[in-house]
Amino acid sequence: NAGVTQTPKFQVLKTGQSMTLQCAQDMNHEYMSWYRQDPGMGLRLIHYSVGAGITDQGEVPNGYNVSRSTTEDFPLRLLSAAPSQTSVYFCATRRGILNTEAFFGQGTRLTVV
Amino acid sequence: KQEVTQIPAALSVPEGENLVLNCSFTDSAIYNLQWFRQDPGKGLTSLLLIQSSQREQTSGRLNASLDKSSGRSTLYIAASQPGDSATYLCAVFQGAQKLVFGQGTRLTINP
């Protein structure tokens, strides 16, 4: 099992460009989420999904879109990249809502210039 | 608003020592607490999950405790090794959808 796979690992964007960060999991987990990690800010929740077709906003959703058409995939879209979105992005999965362990991908390091 | 604090921010100890990392949280209404390690430039690796009804969990040389009433958790590492050097993060499950993380403790084990 690959677990949680994020692509790409690194990306440099120009301000105003759009892109999609991919997250795929092979653990058949219902719950998926996106976090960003910034120095001094820790990890913060961007968006999450409790199952295919269901998404909701987290703590810092502005500038990001998500969709969940399958159990396996949960892409994160940057609509118009800004330097403030320079960060490391992590995708996480859990089997269910309660009493289950969270598993993280290896991250995507994004730089917006 | 839930706040998670980890003290110390950094810790350096000689190889072989036993050590304790601390995590405190302000709202005791949590579902679970999870400890992770993060190596530089890497993702988060799950170490231990403590469910709200449990008081501790053990995995190998690691032991994590949870005291919800006082808002504290500790991660005990026995017989530390250089390979234990990493940043250790604790996170509490706040509600059903959100993990709230501490800032982490950067641990260095000196050979």
Image: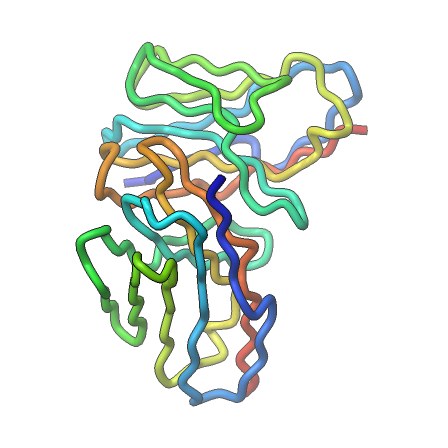
Q: Position of residue A61 (x, y in %)?
A: 56, 21
Q: List the single residue furthest toward the left.
A: B53
| Residue at (46, 72) in percent of width and height | B84
Q: Is residue A103 left or right of residue A75?
A: left
Q: In the drawing, does residue A7 fall left or right of residue B27?
A: right
Q: Position of residue B16 (x, y in %)?
A: 43, 89
Q: Quadrant of the C terminus of chain B?
A: bottom right
Position of residue B104 relative to residue A76, above or below, is below
Q: Residue farthest to the front? A: B69
* Residue B76 to residue A32: above or below: below
Counting the numbered discs, the total is 0
Q: Residue at x 59, y 52 (%)?
A: B41
Q: Nearer the viewer, residue B54 or B16?
A: B54
Compared with residue B59, is residue B30 higher up or lower down, i.e. above or below? Answer: above
Placement of A22 over or under A5, stated as above or below: above
Q: Quadrant of residue B58?
A: bottom left
Residue A88 % position (x, y): 61, 39
Please report the residue visible at 79 percent of the width from the left and 20 percent of the height from the top.
A15
Which quadrant of the view contains residue B104?
bottom right
Colour theme: rainbow
Along the line of sight, the residue nearer the viewer: B54 or B60: B54
Q: Nearer the viewer, residue B6 or A38?
A: B6
Q: Estimate the x, y position of residue A105 in percent, counting from the top left.
A: 44, 40
Residue depicted at 30% across the width and 57% down the height: B68
